[in-house]
Image: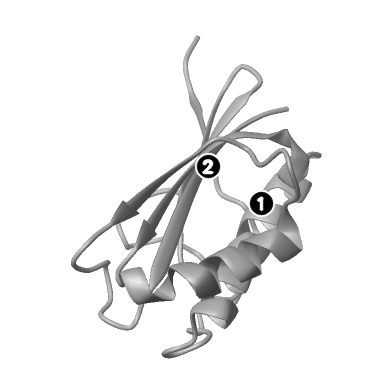
Amino acid sequence: MKPEIIRPQSVHSTQGIGYSHVAKAGNTVYIAGQVALDKDGAFVGKHDIDAQTTQVYVNLQAILQELDGGLGNIVKLTTYLTDRDQLDGFRRARNRVFAEPFPPNTLVFVSGLAHPDYLVEIEAIAVL
């Protein structure tokens, strides 16, 4: 089965940047790491882990809704944070979106992301 690259209209464009937001293989959807950019590509939440995390989940939800799914279709997340001191803020924002039982998540602390103002990036795998 050949994967299909999907260019969702509900999030910022990746044209000319060198990656795609979504690949779909069968019923499985692979979503590239989402950062705190709104639909128009404007950065959201400088120095604010809550605002950035919220925007990331807004992006994931928008992508999945465009594919006739939702956050409940997520089977695996990988979260990248740049600062251990932001963990509680990340968790508070996450807990407004997800409840027990949380989807599996790998949490990784990194020295930086694609832009120095990004505090969080989350990628997802979902089954529709």
Quarter of the image with the C terminus in it: top right
Which residue is at the front of the view, 106 or 33? 106
Say above or below: 125 vs 31.
above
Which residue is at the front of the view, 23 or 58? 58
Give me the disc on residue 35. Answer: none
Tell me the element at label 1.
helix
- Mark 1 belongs to which amino acid? Ile
Instruction: State whether residue 85 appears in this view.
Output: yes
Sequence-wise, the earlier of marks 2 and 1 is 1
Q: CA distance from mark 2 to mark 1?
A: 11 Å
Tell me the element at label 2.
strand
Place of residue 121 in the rendered image (x, y in percent of width and height, measured from the top left): 42, 61
Say above or below: 50 vs 8.
below
Place of residue 7 in the rendered image (x, y in percent of width and height, measured from the top left): 56, 49
Disc 1 residue crowd, few under 14, some 14–19, many 20+, Cα 10 Å: many
Instruction: State whether residue 11 appears in this view.
Output: no
Residue in the image at 31% along x and 72% along y:
83
Residue in the image at 72% along x and 35% along y:
73
Report the residue marked by disc 1.
63
Say above or below: 32 vs 37.
above
Tell me the mark number nearer the camera, choosing from 2 and 1: 2
Which residue is at the front of the view, 92 or 30? 92
- Mark 2 belongs to which amino acid? Ala
Which residue is at the front of the view, 65 or 86? 86
Say above or below: 114 vs 50.
above
Residue in the image at 36% along x and 57% along y:
80
Residue in the image at 51% along x and 87% along y:
45
Residue 56, quarter of picture:
bottom right
Report the residue marked by disc 2.
124
